[in-house]
Amino acid sequence: MHKTASLFLSHGAPNRILKAHPANDFLQNLATTDLFTQAKAIVIMSPHWITKQLSISATGTLSSINDFGGFEPELYQQQYQTEQPQWLTDAVSDVLSKNKIDFSVVKQGLDHGAWTVLKLINPNGRLPVLAMSLPVLTGFNSGKDMSAYIQLGEKLSALTEQGIIFIGSGSATHNLSRLSLNGKTASWAVEFSQWLQQQVAETNLTALANAYRLNSHMLMAHPRPDHYLPLLVAAGIQTSNKNMQSKLLHDSYEYANLNNSSFMFS
């Protein structure tokens, strides 16, 4: 069985899907690599589906949800659909149960943090998909040690041995009050993104989990950590690999201060 990598992909604004953008090109090109052509399925965690206890989507058809407002009318015409077979539900449920993770199985569609990525990286729903919620663990509140999310990733590592790709969807920076249509990228966004890239390159998971304490720009970059936490889960999945490697796959901006850094962990 081909062992898969895990990914953190910055999903950007919902309407990025309508435009020509380097991040969209990156995702479309990534879809043609061995990472996806040799995979059996995708598990995707989005910060737009937050639950107290971890949840996974139920077997069946997963359809896109337009969980946003105020964008171009054509965005609401976009659709995405894929299938979640019973074997995938069973495989993920088995990993969760064996690691004593309490979870529920619920009927759930794909929010924009999931489907806008999947529409580019898994066109026509070629690979089956399971949606996983972002659970509220220790570290969910701003300023705290977030290592519980790395530990969650560790417990999901068996997915990679079954040819299942884990995608943590989020954003390298996510401060909606600091976005701009015409402004320049602020120094805090650049400096935080560079710090983030350095810690990932060095697989410094301790620093990543303690970003609020160690980086003075973290609170500006992430007033809430929800769009950051899926990165920690993606990294944690590979910690059992003694030769763990991490790689920056893409770096771009939109709306001045929304950074799209995306990473692979293997």
Image (tube, rainbow, N blue to C red):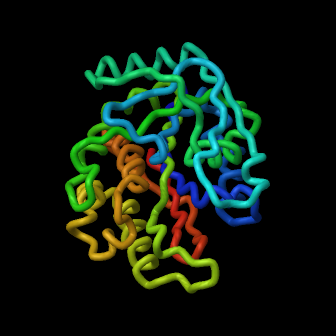
Query: For the view shown, which residue lies furthest in the front direction?
Result: 70
- Residue 146: where, in percent of width, then height? 25, 51
Looking at the picture, tell me which residue is in the foreground, 42 or 37: 42
Image position of 209 with respect to 127: above or below: below
Image position of 89 with respect to 245: above or below: above
**Which of the 4 quarters of the picture holds residue 83?**
top right
Residue at 59%, 30% in the rendered image: 129
Residue at 32%, 31% in the rendered image: 53
- Residue 11: where, in percent of width, then height? 57, 55
Image position of 212 with respect to 67: above or below: below
Left or right of 247? Residue 200 is: left
Residue at 59%, 29% in the rendered image: 41
- Residue 159: where, in percent of width, then height? 44, 28
Q: How many marks?
A: 0
Q: Quadrant of the C terminus?
A: top left
Residue at 55%, 14% in the rendered image: 87
- Residue 231: where, in percent of width, then height? 41, 51
Looking at the picture, tell me which residue is in the foreground, 60 or 201: 60
Image position of 86 with respect to 240: above or below: above
Left or right of 48? Residue 129 is: right
